[in-house]
Image: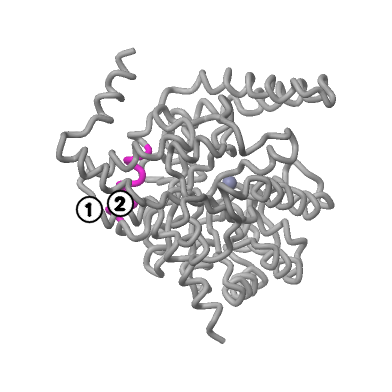
C-alpha cells in the first residue's frame, strides 16, 4: 500500500512540469527496439486487436501508452528447438507477425525504413518492424540472410543464448574469442544490406569486435547496465561507451531480474524448477487451450517470489547509460512478452511508457534528449544503416 502511494506521488509532476509533459507528449514518437509478441500470434492465437489483461502488448494498450513503433522479435531459442526447426520456425513467426499486422492495417503498418516509421507515425498509426534474434536462424547462409532482408527484417542479433558459428554468446561457450572470421563477414554483409547489427546477448569481446568491424552504428536492442545490476546479460560501462563511440544505441531491457541483482538471484535459483513445472503442464494438457493460462499462472507464482522492483530502477539504468555515453546513445528495448511477465512495478505493459517521460523530466533531461531516448535515436541509426548500404 505504502509503496503504491509513493509510486503515485513520484508520478505527479509540478504544474510547470505538467505543462511541459503535455507539450512533449504531443506527437512524441515512442519506439521500442525489442518486443516478443509474435510467437503468441502463432502458438496461442493471441490477437493484436482487443485489450487483454495478460501479456504486455496489444493495439489498445499501444494507443494508451502512445507506443508508435516496435521492432518485433522473431526467434526460436536454440536450447528449445532442434536445429532443423530454427529456420522454418523463424519464417512461421515472421509470417504470423505480417498476417497480424495486415489484419489490423487501419491501425498498424509494416515498416522497413526510417522514412516509413516517420510517415506511419505522422498518419497516427503504429509502425511494426521485424528483427531476427540469433544468427543461428539463418542456417549458416548469407543467402538466407538476404532473403530475410527481402522479407522486411531490419536487424539481427548476432547470437542468442548459445554461441554459434558467428559469435560467442554471453551465456554460451567462448569458442571464437569474440566474433569468428565468418562473423566479421556477416557484419559486413549486414552493413551492405542496411540491416542493423544487434549486439545484445553476445559476449563483451564479440560486441567490441562487431563495433570494430561495422561501418554503421550498432545497437544493443535489449540490454541493461552491469554497473547497476552485475548479472551476466547486462553490459559493462566500457562496452556501452564503445557502442556509443561509433554512434550506436543501447536500448535498456525492462526485465525485473536484469534491473536488480537480488531479483535475478531468486529468478535464477528457481528457473529450472519453474520450467519443469511448465513442461509438466504442457505435456499434461496436450493441445488444450487452457494450457497457456496455466503456464502464466506458474510464471506469476515464481515471479511473486522475487523482490519487488519498480520503474524508477529502470530509470536509473537509462540515466546511468545516458550520463555515461550521452542521451543520443540510449533507447528503450523492453523485451516485453519475452520476459515471462517479470515486469517492474509501474511498467507493467506498453500502456506505461509515459511514466518514463515524466521520470526523465524530473531527472532534468531536455526535451530533445527525451525525444531521442524515447524513440528518435533508433530512427537515426536506421537511417545511418540505410546510408551506409547506399554507399558501394
Ligand atoms: Zn533476448
Local crowd size for mark 2, using a 10 Å CA cut-off: few (<14), some (14–19), many (≥20): many
- The percent coordinates of residue 235 (x first, y second) are 44, 50
Report the quarter where the C terminus lies. Answer: bottom right
Local crowd size for mark 1, using a 10 Å CA cut-off: few (<14), some (14–19), many (≥20): few
| Foreground of the two, 119 or 148 | 119
- The percent coordinates of residue 253 (x first, y second) are 47, 43
For image coordinates 51% across by 78% down, the residue present is 388
* Magenta-colored stretch includes residue 301: no
Horizontal side, residue 150 vs residue 17: left or right = right
For image coordinates 71% across by 49% down, the residue present is 99
Which residue is outermost to the bottom?
392
Q: Are marks 2 and 1 in contact (CB under 8 Å)?
A: yes
Q: Main secondary structure of the magenta part?
A: helix
For image coordinates 41% across by 70% down, the residue present is 246
The secondary element bearing badge 1 is classed as loop
Mark 2 sits on what residue?
A: 370
Which residue is outermost to the top?
1
Mark 1 sits on what residue?
A: 366
- The percent coordinates of residue 203 (x first, y second) are 54, 55
Q: From what the image shows, is residue 220 above or below residue 274?
A: below
| Foreground of the two, 100 or 254 | 100
Q: Which mark is residue 299?
A: none
Q: From what the image shows, is residue 388 above or below residue 93?
A: below
Q: From what the image shows, is residue 215 above or below residue 218?
A: below
Horizontal side, residue 318 vs residue 101: left or right = left
Magenta stretch, residue numbers = 314-324
Quarter of the view holding residue 196: bottom right
The secondary element bearing badge 2 is classed as helix
Ligand 1 near label 1 (Cβ, under 8 Å)? no
Horizontal side, residue 59 vs residue 104: left or right = left
Quarter of the view holding residue 240: bottom left
Amino acid at each position: 500500500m505504502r509503496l503504491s502511494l509513493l509510486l503515485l506521488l513520484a508520478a505527479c509532476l509540478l504544474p510547470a512540469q505538467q505543462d511541459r509533459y503535455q507539450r512533449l507528449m504531443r506527437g512524441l514518437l515512442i519506439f521500442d527496439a525489442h518486443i516478443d509478441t509474435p510467437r503468441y500470434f502463432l502458438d496461442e492465437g493471441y490477437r493484436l486487436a482487443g485489450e487483454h489483461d495478460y501479456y504486455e502488448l496489444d493495439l489498445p494498450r499501444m494507443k494508451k501508452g502512445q507506443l508508435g513503433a516496435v521492432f518485433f522479435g522473431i526467434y526460436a531459442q536454440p536450447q528449445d528447438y532442434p536445429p532443423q526447426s530454427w529456420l522454418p520456425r523463424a519464417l512461421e513467426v515472421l509470417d504470423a507477425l505480417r498476417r497480424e499486422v495486415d489484419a489490423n492495417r487501419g491501425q498498424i503498418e509494416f515498416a522497413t525504413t526510417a522514412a516509413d516509421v516517420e510517415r506511419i507515425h505522422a498518419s497516427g498509426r503504429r509502425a511494426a518492424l521485424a528483427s531476427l534474434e540469433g544468427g543461428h536462424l539463418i542456417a549458416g547462409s548469407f543467402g538466407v540472410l538476404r532473403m530475410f532482408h527481402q522479407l522486411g527484417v531490419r536487424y539481427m542479433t548476432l547470437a542468442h543464448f548459445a554461441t554459434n558459428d558467428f559469435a560467442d554468446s554471453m551465456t554460451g561457450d567462448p569458442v571464437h574469442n569474440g566474433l569468428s572470421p565468418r562473423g566479421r563477414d556477416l557484419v559486413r554483409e549486414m552493413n551492405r544490406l542496411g540491416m542493423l547489427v544487434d549486439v545484445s546477448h553476445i559476449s563483451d569481446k564479440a560486441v567490441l569486435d562487431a563495433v570494430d568491424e561495422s561501418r554503421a552504428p550498432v545497437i544493443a536492442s535489449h540490454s541493461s547496465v552491469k554497473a547497476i545490476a552485475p548479472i551476466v546479460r547486462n553490459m559493462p560501462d566500457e562496452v556501452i561507451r564503445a557502442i556509443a563511440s561509433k554512434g550506436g544505441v543501447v536500448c535498456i531491457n525492462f526485465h525485473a531480474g536484469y534491473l536488480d541483482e537480488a531479483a535475478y538471484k531468486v529468478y535464477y535459483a528457481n528457473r529450472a524448477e519453474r520450467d519443469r513445472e511448465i513442461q509438466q503442464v504442457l505435456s499434461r494438457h496436450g493441445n488444450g487451450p487452457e494450457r497457456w493460462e496455466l503456464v502464466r499462472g506458474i510464471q506469476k507464482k515464481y515471479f511473486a517470489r522475487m523482490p519487488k522492483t519498480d520503474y524508477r530502477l529502470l530509470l536509473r539504468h537509462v540515466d546511468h547509460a545516458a550520463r555515461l555515453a550521452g542521451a543520443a546513445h540510449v533507447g528503450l528495448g523492453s523485451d516485453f512478452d519475452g520476459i515471462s511477465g517479470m515486469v517492474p512495478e509501474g511498467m507493467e505493459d506498453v500502456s506505461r511508457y509515459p511514466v518514463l517521460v515524466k521520470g526523465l523530466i524530473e531527472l532534468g533531461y531536455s526535451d530533445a534528449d527525451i525525444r531521442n531516448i524515447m524513440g528518435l535515436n533508433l530512427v537515426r541509426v536506421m537511417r545511418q544503416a540505410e546510408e551506409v548500404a547506399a554507399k558501394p
